[in-house]
Amino acid sequence: MSAVLSTAAQASAPTATQAATEAAPGFCEGMLYFAEPDPRDAELAAAPVIAEGGTAIGAIDAAAVHQARLAADALRYTTLQLCASKQSGHPGGFASAADAVAALTLLGHKNLVTEVGHHAPGFYSAMFLDGSLTRMGIETMTDLQARFRERDGLLGHLSGAIPGLLAPAGPLGQGQHFAMAGAYLHPDKLFPCTIGDGGLGEPYVLSAMTHFHTVYPEITNFLPVLVWNGYSQEHHAMVSLMDNAAMTQLWQAHDFERVILVDAKDYDDAGQPGAYVDSTRFGDAARDAFTRAVLEAMREAADAAMTGTLTVVIIKQLKGAGVHAHGAKSHNLYPGDTAEQPAIAEALRRRALSPQQWALVRQNLSRAGGGPAAEVAVTEHERPLAAVGDLPMQAFGVGEKAVPSTAMAEMVAALGERDPAFIVSNADGTEASAMKVINQRLKIRHPTADDLYHQGPSGQVYEPLSEDACAGLAAGVALFGGRSLWLSYESFAINGWPIVQTVGQAMAELRRRTPAVVSMFTAGALEQGRNGWTHQRPEIENYIGAQMRNGNVYLLYPSDANMIQAAYAWAVDQSNKAISIVASKSALPVYTTPEQAGRAIADGAVSLYESPAGDGAMVVFAVTGDMVLLPVFAAKEQLEAAGKRVRIVSVANPRRLFRPGDVAWQHSAEPDDAFMDDAAFAQLFDGDVLMAVSGGGSTALEPVLLRTKAPARDLIAWQRGETTASPAEIMAYNGISGEALTRRALALSGAGVQP
């Protein structure tokens, strides 16, 4: 099919070019090339295969095949011109997936996710072509290019801000979690998920789906679509040498009952070398046959997935099919890769559509699924939540001893009983975290029923031995509109945190309210003495603490069993936030009343103790954590004996203690501008000496150190792990003991004692 330059590319174009441009739909303004009319269109493109009021193609006939080809070429063309407009972005991977995306869309499936962030320009093209991006004021190709990879526009990788796109995509190996979460919450919808063969090398993709299928065998309405194109970002994919039988067996070994593989090589009539070929190089008959095979495979797979069969579709086609280069060389564009670059210009000419074909593609894609994805995708609407009311809370008396994690567990169990869709995910044992009541009342979801272990096939506790799988499903459920809780040992949480970070950032951008993604880390470093440094990794707190400046990330440090209940009650009531609670599983003193506990979480901090009025210097302890308060209170006794006054402040919600300008709260979809004012801060933290103390990471104490006016100050925090017999020993090993704190406070207060 020959192509002509549009007036956007050539002001003095021949009359035919001007006529083509003038005939093009308005959204095509800015496109560089248009094709001459195709003689086959009179028969095969006289009317859209999705009629007005329809949602999907009917029979897979010659017209459906022809129009699916047009849709795939439209996606490739738009993707390549879009990337060339910024000499940046990734067209090659999506190009090999375009036939699959076109087929799924024309079959009416708009709840499409991906684990490949590099496919972003292709997904943006799909949203542009179906009209979804008009919600962002993107009406034309010119608008699309102007907003690509720009602030308040179309990010280089998928985010939560783009109308019609269900989930973010950046780090590999995450997309399947979103597909499974969507399938879990919306059993009447299909959730296809494109997976690159580069991403398949991530260790959790297949194992996560296997565990999910083991415990939710009835949920099969997610459909992985492997884009097997032979290449990763800069080299061959690690699975590129597999043959079709081996790839099929790999998926079968992970419980997939139906493996449908469409290999472009089987249709090649162009004599292309190698195992991976480009279907756009085929002759018309061969390309029609390949397109028909993809449509039939997708329809068969969708039907199987929606009727109880765990299914995967594998599209084997060379990376870069239909664009400017092949293999890893097609992966991304560099400075100088403009639309005038010969290989790119030639690729655009080959993929160009006629004005009438562009109009047809827009009609089909905008009608598919019942409307633009921005109108029909499940994440474009706020999901109704089960009413749970106020969760039960125990009022522990000040001076009692109680286990914080157990107190919270009672609330978690009650929430699960009131919201059947609520899930708890945990990889290392809820019971080991003194939260056994969750297992007792909600049950571990497991195919083997056993009352001794509180497990059965209908439980709400999801326990794969993978923090990535735990965090992924919990975060996905929250993003898609459900309640969830990820429980983890603090020492292992880093293995699952990246997807919570991804989802938390996406939540800050969403155009709808969704429950906060809540996590709780127990069995912290101070409780893991005999396990040694393998279980003592509180540096995760610094990772999360640094994210508090994002605007919607909260790291909570309840000081006792009353406060952890206040923390969880607050977290359950929040929207579009990422909230982590750090607490112990040991019986510890209760320092606050329920009223004080609630105030601490709402305001950010609360005073747990203050010496009677006197003349001695005031030593203020600003403390994050619960168990670490034991040496702090021991130091209080010694300091008062030395004539000093002491105030002990629990820093419970440190994000509240920042100055408003320190945090990007105004950029969050659900902005939270609650910060402690200067007068309240001074009342809590002003003194002669400020001792900031943490049994874990120190970053959460940053806002206190930024704002304090104490003339002398110090920061005492975790240094490194070691095998010890008790929490007191590991704290002392890290310089956190009553004696060490006393010495340092006396030195800072001018008592002449060396630290």
Image: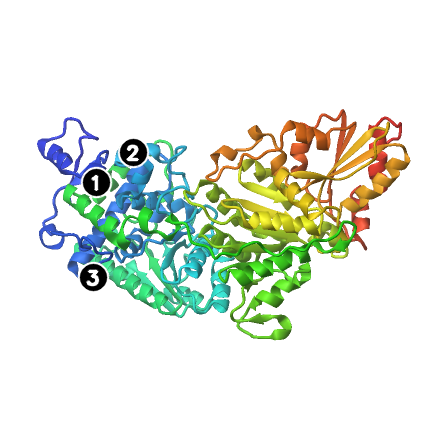
- In the image, residue 656 above or below residue 203: above
Mark 2 falls on what kind of element? helix
Q: Are marks 1 and 3 in contact (CB under 8 Å)?
A: no
Would residue 353 be found to the left or right of residue 408 on screen? left
N-term-proximal mark, 2 vs 1: 2
Residue at coordinates 32% horizontally, 32% vertically from top-left?
146
**CA gap, disc 1 and disc 3:** 31 Å
Task: Look at the image and tell me whether residue 543 can be seen.
Answer: no
**What residue does disc 2 label?**
143
Residue at coordinates 56% horizontally, 28% vertically from top-left?
661
Q: Amino acid at mark 2?
A: Asp
Of 301 and 10, which appears nearest the observer?
301
N-term-proximal mark, 1 vs 3: 3
Q: Amino acid at mark 1?
A: Arg
**CA gap, disc 2 and disc 3:** 34 Å
Residue at coordinates 82% horizontally, 36% vertically from top-left?
611
Q: Give me the disc on residue 58.
A: 3
Mark 1 falls on what kind of element? helix
Would residue 547 be found to the left or right of residue 608 on screen? left
**What residue does disc 1 label?**
349
Please state the horizontal and vertical placement of residue 461, each as a whole percent of the image: 56, 63
